Amino acid sequence: MRKLLLCFIALFLFPVFAGAEWNDSIRYKGEAVVEIPAGGNTPFWLMNGKYGVSSLKNNHGYLRLSAFKDMDTSKRFSWGAGADVVVGYGMQSVAYLQQLYVEAKYRCLNLMIGAKEMPGFLSNPELATGNMLYANNAHPIPQVKAGIFDYADFAKGWVGIKGYISYGKYTDNRWINNWVDKKTQYTLGTLYHSKALFLRGGNAKKFPLEFEMGIEMATQFGGTTYYPNGNIVKMPRKLINWIKALIPLNGGEDTPVGEQTNVEGNFIGSWNFALSWKPQADWNIKVYFEHVFEDHSMLWFDYPWKDGLWGVEAKLPRNPFVSEIVYEYLYSKDQAGAVYWDHTPEINEQVSGRDGYYNHYICNGWQNWGMGIGNPLFISPIYNSSHELFFVGNRLWAHHLGIKGEPSKYVGYKVLATYQKNWGTYPRPFPEVKSSFNLLTELNFKVPSLPGWQADLAFGMDAGSLIGHNYGVQVKISKTGWLFGKKK
């Protein structure tokens, strides 16, 4: 706890030593959350989409205090920082740093060092299920990230480009050691790499149609894997391995045979496309598609792109009923087919099916602290009663609806409703198809005489055989404001 307090003190004092004024817009937020049990585990939408600040136990609560110095994007050079502490009961840890980072920009170039909550590029972080590669579902991974984080405009604003490259390291070793069943396979000390490149065509200020497309890729590498039979495999962490994470290449002789045949590490990514119609400043509509891939076979067009996330998002003109609405359809049953075969000297054929989304035969899979980093409809390993770091259900289809409205400037609401059917995985199919219906209704209240204060009341429920029948109520009281006065 002493280290957490020192982080906050350093954040508050840093503007002085950096030459900034005390009123340089240091934003704070405090919140208290209590989960009131009603039956089963924490309902799905009270558990997921929280950047990992949640618990499967349907009886938990926490206090959260954060402070941020936001960057001024209107300036040529600007810097920012943030610290975010969570203390609770019934959580994965009694106290932990959720965010701690510093960042800077010069013109369009950005640099971020630390752990920061960053939503995905295309879908609505409040109403959508979550991007296929990065959803707001797991704790942020500490990393060094550099690039162009927001679109830099060219050709008089008709073309935009953004992208990044990052390296980091997982911090969940202690949690894994405490949670995982040691009779199952698990990996400690995993390293992390990610990169992306996005293009935008169109200028909404001159014509209301815009198109976006981009590719985002990540690799889990390094680490030490412990097997149930007592074997231990330590993956190499030399400079060449960091380069192979950047440029996906086959593993060397110091890696298992499977890595030598395929790409070293857990290589995962997504293609992303969006078309937006923005006729007016206060309303627009966007359609988008995200295609996830686990290796080279689905990176290009070796196999048909049958799997993906299709979505429609609409932001409506000011009215007392609905301000935003999202519909999504997710399909992931194909995975390049049910057959997989690596070529051998005897049978020199390659069949690259059974992609196994979010799983890997060495790494812990696309998760952090037990929560899936990607779309949460691929039920996270934290739900496994076997305490195994494995996504047990990655072949599914699902429909999702999200609605948000503001009947008045002091009252708002949000509704999420999701239905899915799940077939398990190719190597471990469910004996019977499982289903799940997940519902969230949330009300937000603001008091005119108490600026910055807000009360949220949420009810969640689940029904079906996938994660069981769950009910719960969540109450949150929060306060936002500015330390030392907001900069004018």
Image: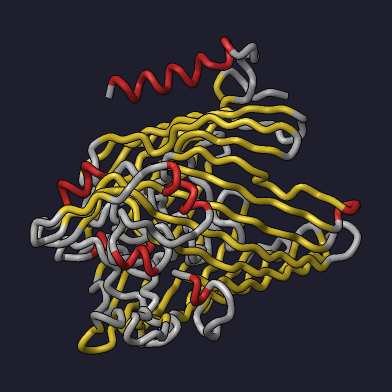
Is residue 300 found left or right of 295 in the rendered image?
right
The image quarter containing residue 347 is bottom left
Whether residue 169 is situated above or below residue 226 in the rendered picture: above
Q: Is residue 68 left or right of residue 34?
A: right
What residue is rendered at 54% in x and 82% in y?
302
User: Residue at 74% of width from left, 68% of height from top?
Assistant: 276
Q: Is residue 486 above or below residue 390?
A: above
Q: Residue at x 27, y 79 (%)?
A: 464
Query: Residue at point 21% right, 42% down?
Result: 174
Q: Quadrant of the N terminus?
A: top left
> Along the line of sight, which residue is nearer the eye, 364 or 240?
240
Residue 300, image x, y percentages: 58, 75
Examine the rendered structure and indicate whether residue 136 appears above or below residue 30.
below
Q: Seen in the image, is 332 located left or right of residue 40?
A: right
Q: Nearer the viewer, residue 51 or 151?
A: 151
183 and 14: which is toward the camera: 183
370 vs 366, left or right, is: left
Please name whichever residue, 135 or 439, is drawn nearer the observer in this view of the structure: 135
* Residue 53 in sight in this render: no
Q: How many marks?
A: 0
Q: Position of residue 304 (x, y in %)?
A: 54, 86
Q: Is residue 250 above or below residue 348?
A: above
Where residue 278 sits in the image (x, y, percent)? 79, 65
Q: Position of residue 171 (x, y in %)?
A: 32, 41
Is residue 163 visible in the rendered image? The answer is yes
Say which quadrant the C terminus sits in: top right
The colour scheme of the drawn protein is: secondary structure
